[in-house]
Image (cartoon, rainbow, N blue to C red):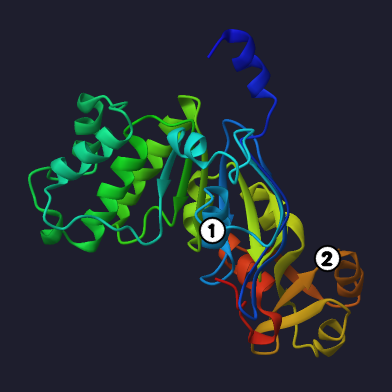
Amino acid sequence: MPPVERERMKDIPAIAIEGLTKRYGPVEALRGVNLQVKRGEILGFLGPNGAGKTTTIRCLLDLIRPRSGRIRVLGIDPAKDPVAIRSRTGYLPGELSLEGNLTVEQMLRYLNELRGRRSDWGYTRRLAGRLELDLAVPIKNLSKGNKQKVGLVQALMHRPELLLLDEPTSGLDPLMQQEVYRLLREAREGGATVFFSSHVISEVEAIAGRVAIIRKGVIVEEAEPGRLVDMSIRRYRVRFCEPVDPGPLAALEGVTPVGQAGDREITLQVEGEVDRLIKALAAFPVSDLQSEHLSLEELFFAYYSDNGEKGESR
């Protein structure tokens, strides 16, 4: 690509989605997804199983067609030129299909042939080594975790511009998950954009520079992982000098008791501004006040509580 063209492409988002909808019969899998992913960032696409993560990724690659909306991947309309997108993308599907009778090496060499021999085999071997993947073992003899490693190697081995990864660490032990995180950071440092879906909160906290939360087929929040923790929900553990009736505190708007230790200590969850709680505490003999930031996991479940209901999307 000429330098002028490369410079122009920097200003084009790696992924741009507007008003994306998709139905599976009566089920609305996507209900108007809007999202942009900048070049060179790692974005975690967070949601529970069934929120619409896989459906979104498959639309990006034109593996399925949306009902409506606009998609551009690397500046290209997937419906018009899916081959161009796939040639520049490393894709790890949630359900990876591999030829069981081939060895790992034969499978990877076959995929490399399909890509026009774009992969450096030495680099492919190094990837396999870092993931402790034996290239000589037949696919049919691999565990679920080792099959996942094959999927990761095939997505990374041609050093693509864009990585689309659906639950990339599924089936991997914690040590191997950390190695995958290192590989994805290295890919970003090499200029790649990483878009990965997950329902594992710690995974998003560990690697993503930005997170998009999808709920029932709609993006409900976009932010840095750390900022989400600070946004709207906090917990406060209050200790009193003497026994008190905490009823007036629990009755405050946006304040919910979530724990109590006798009549001298209470834990309160506060949504939104804490000013009303602080002012109310002035009337009590407070000996100690501790703020507890919710983890991203707790915040995530707050988004999806909805009276215990889960999304029906795929």
- Camera-nearest label, 1 or 2: 1
Query: Label 2, on which residue?
Result: 272
Q: Amino acid at mark 2?
A: Gly
Q: Within the image, what quadrant is residue 183 found in?
A: top left
Q: Amino acid at mark 1?
A: Ile
> Which structural element holds mark 1?
loop
Residue 122 spot, x, y in % from top left: 20, 25
Q: Is residue 277 left or right of residue 160?
A: right
Q: Within the image, what quadrant is residue 19 found in?
A: bottom right
In depth, the one of 181 and 299 nearer the eye is 181
Earlier residue among tags 1 and 2: 1
The residue that appears at 46% across and 32% down in the rendered structure is 88
Q: Is residue 121 left or right of residue 115?
A: left
The residue that appears at 64% across and 85% down in the rendered structure is 308
Mark 1 and mark 2 in contact? Answer it, CB < 8 Å.
no
**Can residue 293 be seen in this snapshot?**
no
> Which structural element holds mark 2?
loop
Q: Is residue 134 left or right of residue 234?
A: left
Quarter of the picture holding the C terminus = bottom right
Which mark, by number, is residue 21? none
Q: Report crowding for label 2: few under 14, some 14 to 19, many 20 or more residues within 10 A (C-alpha).
A: some
Query: Label 1, on which residue?
Result: 64
Total label count?
2
The residue that appears at 54% across and 54% down in the rendered structure is 57
Look at the picture and state if 16 lies above or below 167.
above
Residue 168 spot, x, y in % from top left: 40, 52
